[in-house]
Image (cartoon, coloured by chain):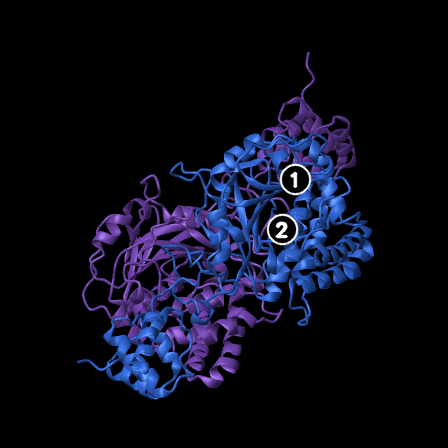
Chain colours: A purple, B blue
Amino acid sequence: MTTPPSLLSLTIHSAILNLSSISDLSFLPDHIVLHLFLETLKAGKLNERVLKLFVASGKDEVLSLIGEFKIQQIVTPVLPTIHIKDNEVDIVIGAFHSDLTSFMNEWRPVFTRFHLIIVKDPELKEDLEIPDGFDLDVYTLQDINRIVGTSNSIKFSGYSCRYFGYLVSRKKYVISVDDDCVPAKDDKGLLIDIVEQHLLNLSTPATPFFFNTLYDPFRKGADFVRGYPFSLRSGVACSLSCGLWLNLADYDAPTQALKPSLRNTRIVDAVLTIPVGAMLPVSGINIAFDREVVGPALCPALRLAGEGKFRWETMEDIWCGLCVKVTCDHLKLGVKSGLPYVWRNERGNAIESLKKEWEGVKLMEEVVPFFQTLRLPEAAVTADACFLEIAKVVREQLGRSNPMFARVAEAMVEWVEIWKKVGSGPLPDDN
Amino acid sequence: MTTPPSLLSLTIHSAILNLSSISDLSFLPDHIVLHLFLETLKAGKLNERVLKLFVASGKDEVLSLIGEFKIQQIVTPVLPTIHIKDNEVDIVIGAFHSDLTSFMNEWRPVFTRFHLIIVKDPELKEDLEIPDGFDLDVYTLQDINRIVGTSNSIKFSGYSCRYFGYLVSRKKYVISVDDDCVPAKDDKGLLIDIVEQHLLNLSTPATPFFFNTLYDPFRKGADFVRGYPFSLRSGVACSLSCGLWLNLADYDAPTQALKPSLRNTRIVDAVLTIPVGAMLPVSGINIAFDREVVGPALCPALRLAGEGKFRWETMEDIWCGLCVKVTCDHLKLGVKSGLPYVWRNERGNAIESLKKEWEGVKLMEEVVPFFQTLRLPEAAVTADACFLEIAKVVREQLGRSNPMFARVAEAMVEWVEIWKKVGSGPLPDDN
């Protein structure tokens, strides 16, 4: 004759079967946690996670049992990687050419899993040609006018149209690639998946506070080298990933005009964190970022008077990158550069562009020292607050001597307003 | 009947034949320079250098002629590279093993052109075995005692023996490689010439004030990317080149113990300048430096109490690297990291070393923030002055809580004295 099971033993039994869904034991009476621990042991259910659960309960008797049994926590060196789901990603493409057929087909193996936002350059007259088989939304001038209205300082024409995509995305991560780029191939001839690499860059920590000579320590096969402080090894979140370019690299018009045959053929198989305080020329050709965290700091604020439709005639991404880097440095976030590469096709006549591009070249002489010495107030704890602080100093310092910078500051302020209004929540309905 | 040539025409004729040895024309009367210019043109001797000579003369008539003839100076984009001669280089090897036969033979194709300084670890009992066919000087404990005498704070045993080689070198450049490293092979299976690559790193400018996303802009096939300020493109002199390691990388004992099978197999085909203000863990395994400029800042000042004969049991190079980086940042000099790679062979038992190595690991937590915030006075304009300033602050700040750092500061001060006494001029004669 067997005694019927007690309510306690039934509860314990049930708890052991459901250990995986229990996240806290501390609120239970000590003797029940002890009982549960012993039964868990008997049932062979003590694994690493469950052990942590019991340790975290803080129950003295359980802790001393763990000690007496010499049960040790296995410290598995786990990469502190976050997992990004496909539906947390938007790929934004600014369309400067009406026929996107070949561009889209080349990217098909990489893009089909993701939602795409295609923003048609408002100055492009022809209808877009986009092949079937993608999950996408297309935005045109009509949508821009409907959603943002007419803005005095923000223009979404040319390369700036992509920023409208950043605005209407509702995803945590945005990947952005120019429509003159196709997938590059690695040394083995395999197609480089830029999405996978960008997401890897964003989902593993950045290490801006000490340089690791073997580059990204979170890549497979790498680690921190001797002398790297252990307290800095957990790193910080990475908010911006800047990819590179094979074939036609992102040179300015003077460099391209001087060395017309210069092509980038070297794949440097590395990702690195740009150290805190160091500025870099972020190119908008091939980037990814954490929209939730730094989205408001990516804005088409700087528009050159003679801006054209070739990358080397624009500076809006360089300006934007300096704003984001200063913001990330201030917020203790990381910026990475390196992999992935895209293959960039030929476009434009650099010598023709020289007539316009010198303006941007000259601007950098003033802009770089400004950003190198810019320090933000501690009260700024979000990207939009940082961005507004930058706008303020731009107006006060750079804007005094050059009215263009006063306009840039104005655009930055307006951008934050637009972002707050349009950057989250439901978008205005289609009419 | 011909008139005999005038003295002037003879002189002009002779001058044209010797244009290559003329470096100044400005002291000559205007009409003679004009005459010389026209004759040079007729003789077809006007090349770029000669044109510059005439332009530099500042003679109005010559300058207007150049203008009228529409003679243009060809602005060839020349890499601002300095040329390093073989006899400006010493290769310093600290000998921790008595039998250097295989080490030397492996390096033979690379080393034979250069003068080698081999410093025998004073604690090594056996005689050195060195194969023939090299131009080298060997230094032993006897030489150390003769040249430096007995020092209270500087010890040249273990890895520190190489610093004696830095001291007695009389060359502008020093390359230093550990005796557990052999030449690595590149992707094509070709032996990597570390000397060539290190000298390339040191002879081309560094760019610490803005990050170039395509890495070293002075490498073949690379350049500055769009947005890089033109005023920063000439860069600064590079004073330290830090190479990397294939196979066994320079991990610390905890990392190597935790991941015993971790090997570095990835060649990252890049050299980059570490940005100003960013600190890095310089490893002494494979480095090169401008001895004339930063030599006095490379010193075996930090010796761990339990220091051993394995790389991961030492920190002297890490400390040294932080001193050099702060010095270079202050003096507006560059530090590069990346290529060349060496192949590092297995040595030692990381788990055994853990007993000693933790001391160094803990030290870094204090040392890194110290160097990150260290600023040197403007009056310090040489590496030795910078190094003495660092020693002062080390004693005042770090030495207060930890007597080990007081000893480090003392060693640094003594090192500069030794360097001044022994680091240049004739060495004391052999007895």
Residue that protrudes farthest toward the top in the picture: A1
Residue B312: mark in rendering = 1
The C terminus of chain A sits in image quarter: bottom left
**x 50%, y 70%: residue:** A387
Labels 1 and 2 in the same subunit: yes
First of labels 1, 2 by sequence position:
2
Label 1 secondary element: helix
**x 35%, y 43%: residue:** A186
Nearer the viewer's eye, disc 1 or disc 2? 2
- In the picture, residue B145 is in which quadrant? top right
Q: CA distance from mark 1 to mark 2?
A: 27 Å
Decide if residue A155 is in sight here. Answer: no
Amino acid type of disc 1?
Trp
Tell me where residue A107 appears, x and y as whole percent: 29, 49
Residue that badge 2 annotates: B169
Amino acid type of disc 2?
Ser
- Residue A236 placement, left or right of B78: right
Q: Is residue B214 above or below residue A85?
A: below
- In the picture, residue A165 is in which quadrant? bottom left
